[in-house]
Amino acid sequence: MGPGMPRRMGMNNDKLKEPLPKNIKEVPDYIKRVVVKFFKRLFYIFSLVWNTAPWILITLMSIAVFSGVLPVLTAWIASRLLNVLAEAYNAINSGGAIEFNKILSLLIFQFICIILSSFIKHLNSLVVRISGEMVSNHVKTMMMEKAQKLDLQSFDKPEFYERLENAQREASMRPVQIINATFNTVSTLISMFSFVAILFTVSPWAPIIIVILALPAGFVSYFYRKKAFDYIRMRSKDRRELSYFSGLLTNKDLVKEIRIFGLSNTFIKKYNLTFKKYFKGLKKIYLKEGFWNMIVSLLSAFSHCALFLFVAWRVWLGKIEVGDYSLYTGALNSVTTGLNSLISSTSTIYEGTLFIDNLIVFMEEKPTILIETDKKEEVKRHIPHEIEFRHLSFKYPGTERYVIKDLNATIKAGETVALVGVNGAGKTTLIKLITRLYDPTEGEILLDGKNLKEYDPEELYKIFGIIFQDFGKYAVTVSENIAFGEIDRAIDEERVKLSAMQSNATEFISRLPKEYDTPLMRYFEEDGIELSIGQWQKLSVARAFYSDSDILILDEPTASLDAIAEQEIYDQFDTLRKDKTTIFVSHRLSSATTADSILVLDNGELVEHGAHSELMSKKGIYHKLFTTQAGRYLEESNAAEADEDNSEGEN
């Protein structure tokens, strides 16, 4: 694997695999491990459902018991009823009679069983549908809560997205599906044991033959369920590609470019090619499973015909009553159906527990951004803060290239510092390290003389008011978008309006249909408003003004604004950053002239450090960047003046 290349994660699923035995001696241990893991997964699923709502398990268990007993009771009543009817028929033909009350009582019991069976069936369906939604919500909430605790570096790893995709795919259906299948198994076992006891009275070999004939079907089902699971898990990359290509054509931010460049057919073709490659292997597994299931089913059908013939022969010999024929053949059918149901249910449970491993592995993902000391340092609030870098180096997880290299510098308390450098110099990465979204690969960052790792990350985040390059655009109201700057307190409408004024957003907000209550983006609301990128950026700046922060960090905060709007924002920042430590990145270097100090980064290294006048006098990288940009602005200004002069001359 070449340097800088992330590991293919999909192929790193060792913790989901159970190594196959190498010889016959290892088989018992292998079976033991598989069984133990199976029940651990099953217990995990039960705990998920129990934590969602205990009544779900209690209700489904009660339904399972009734569902197991009712078929046996119904079959017994039906056989008794046939025998009584046959007895009545014979009595009438011989001049006798049987009281109808005897028949009526059996009919009433039969009707009760039919009504109960229908009621329980619909009740089970209702419980499964309701509980499915509840458990799905519970699991997805768990996943969201887990995701918020994970480090940013987790989101940089392909293997993380594989686990996330697998877990999300299973979250909505698997737990309740497995629970329902488990209780179906319970009811099936209750019925089967009862019918097996009935069959033993005809022939002890009958149930044994049925069970033996069911074993191949069980083997086929388990074997191919495991094979399908392994295939689906290993082809997670294909599924993510399918989701990506289909999502491109429904992404409202990309639809304009895709339409203009005529990319739709290209992405549809890529989608179909990926699906063809993915489905080819899956189809092969399904066809093989179907073929062997048909062979096993034919053998099973012939054996059942033979057993039916045997029961009929016993009736013909007069060894059992006519009504008992329905009981015994019904028992044969029920045991056979029960075995098939048992195989199907247990296969579903087995397959489901394999897939639920995806959720378990995701939930076991460990954060590394933790307090690395027994004594937690208190984050002091509402004071200027000093930040120091000591031999700071960093490379993103799974890569070998250092984005920051042996950086040493100090940002003094209350100082305003500009980060300058070409794209890819490491400016945004440095901001991510300062805010402890990542931990350094080497070296350390000190806040007020203490290593960042000694502070509680949640408390640390509260001191930062930050605008990233890729700032958030949220499909909520204008007021909420601004108030997200300090989410721990109720929305203060006056502060919202003040923040909007400070970010120069008041003018365009006043023109919106509902002003601060206007819903933004048209994801959910028909009257949602689509803002320009410049308007969105003003809202993100307002969000920073709204936050009760000690350290302001501005990563290209005005990139989408014109020069006049940008200057107005920086004028407001001059007021806002009073007595605060401020770090900003700006694509217009004229803004850097207002900074107390400038850090010039080049390829991850700190190459220059000082005030604007000092760096200009050095005639180094900063001087070159500044004069190049200033020259371009001057050329544009001269060209505009020339156009204006020409226009006046023509007039």
Image: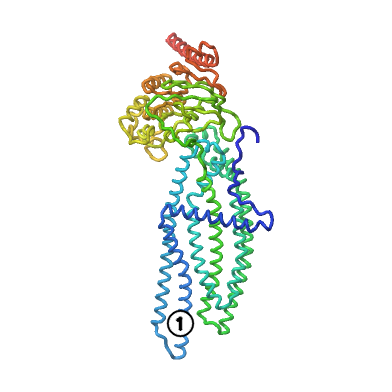
Picture mark count = 1
Residue at x 60%, y 69% (from the top left corner): 301
Residue 399: quadrant of the picture: top right
Q: Position of residue 410 (x, y in %)?
A: 48, 22
Residue at x 60%, y 62% (from the top left corner): 218
Residue at x 50%, y 79% (from the top left corner): 323
Q: Which residue is mark 1?
A: 84
Q: Position of residue 612 (x, y in %)?
A: 47, 14
- 492 with respect to 313 (left or right): left
Q: Position of residue 288 (x, y in %)?
A: 64, 56
- 120 with respect to 495 (left or right): right
Vertical comparison of 111 with 166: above or below: below
* Other-residue count near label 1 (Cα within 10 Å), few / some / many at <14 / 14–19 / ≥20: some
Which image quarter is the N terminus in?
Answer: top right
Which image quarter is the C terminus in?
Answer: top left
Give the residue type at disc 1.
Val
